[in-house]
Amino acid sequence: MSDRTDGAINRRRVLAGLAGAGVVALGAAAVPASAAPSTAAPGAGRPAAPPAGAGKPGRRETLVPAQTSWELPPPMTGGPTTVRVRDADLEVWDTRGKGSAIVLQHPHSGHGGVWGYQQAAFAKAGHRVISYSRRGYGGSTGFTTAAGTDLRDLEALMDLLGVGQFHLVGIAAGANVVLDAALRLPERVLTAMPGCSIFGIAEDSWNAVNARMTGGGFRTVTDPATGTITRTGLDPEFQELGPSYRAAAPAEVLSAWHQNEAQPNPPTPLPGTEQPLRWADLEKITTPTMLFTGDADMYLPPSRLREVASHMPSARMTLFAEVGHSPHWEAYRPFNDMVLSFAHEHRPR
């Protein structure tokens, strides 16, 4: 990995927790789950480790060590330019070039210009990098409740830019369209990398847990007369960034994150999916998929990611240590490594 593991990481805690799930921790100072120290009383013995390959075929989970230093993101290039897509003007950043395209879908707390850490790294690796502000975010217009879905805009924009196949990465609200595109556009999506999201899944049991986990401080209030949504609980920084990052990141880096978060956004995003996703839909996805989250993500902790992965037998998972809801900022070096490695593994023929 690009960043050295902080000696303060409690490996005993992390690996003991992973051992119960039959996980192998990869990266710097990697240790097999079977080597995790026992938490049983002395002389009680240790349960046998799961055999190699236990669980569903193709399952692999990677724990990435923490990133412990940060610099300001490089400035975005290739835009923004305004592109007319369907009935909206979208602000787009496009590095162009002949390499395979990586298309980036931003979170709700951002816009198409939040990818400075990724754009330069991916372009240097030979990729064409495309990001854009979805309707109502940043400088993009055309947000109405009748505007359709993010998937329609994505497909139309790729057609307009002359992009046939592409790798698709999305975080939080931007991840919904990633799974939908993997399901409905398998001939175009080379890889799907969605994470830190509740994914627009319409299952009662899934949403009941979501409501319980994001109640209280996460709750918002909608004015029935105007449709305006007011945040009544936690500060965005608290919701979006993990505590380790908030404590250790330089003030100027946190300030840059706040500048992005302060950009215009709609009260409620467009639906990311053509139809609400069901477990049965996820089971139909054949596109190579990498699911990811931060181990301190309050929306999608690792246990919730595993629940999604249980319906996608060929999907792989990456967990970012000491990271909250924004791994593209909090752990941009290992995040970039993950994206580039997975894209390289599934290069277009």
Image (cartoon, rainbow, N blue to C red):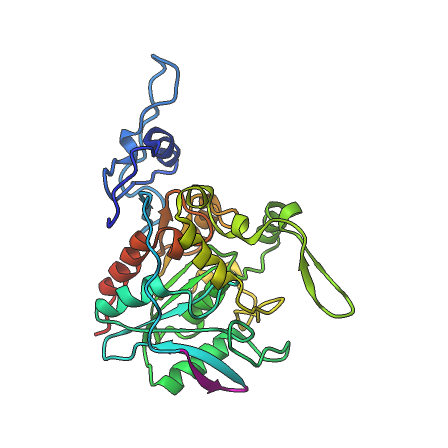
Q: Is residue 144 above or below residue 36?
A: below
Q: Residue 21 or 56: which is nearer the viewer?
A: 21
Q: Is residue 141 magenta?
A: no
Q: Is residue 82 magenta?
A: yes
Q: Is residue 56 visible?
A: yes
Residue under the image location 41 percent in, 56 percent down = 312
Q: Residue 164 or 44: which is nearer the viewer?
A: 164
Residue under the image location 23 percent in, 75 percent down = 99
Numbered range of the magenta stretch: 80-87
Which part of the image, by quadrant, shows the C terminus? bottom left
Residue 12 % position (x, y): 34, 29
**Quadrant position of residue 13:** top left
Q: Residue 66 or 207: which is nearer the viewer?
A: 66
Residue 199 % position (x, y): 51, 60
Residue 314 % position (x, y): 34, 56
Q: Is residue 309 visible?
A: no
Residue under the image location 55 percent in, 87 percent down = 87
Disc tally is: 0
The single residue placed furthest to the top in the displayed view is 43
Left of 95 or right of it: where is 154? Answer: right
Q: Is residue 349 above or below residue 194?
A: below
The single residue placed furthest to the front in the displayed view is 252
Residue 28 % position (x, y): 23, 41
Left of 273 or right of it: where is 80? Answer: left
**Quadrant position of residue 9:** top left
Left of 342 or right of it: where is 236? Answer: right
Majority SS type along the magenta span = strand
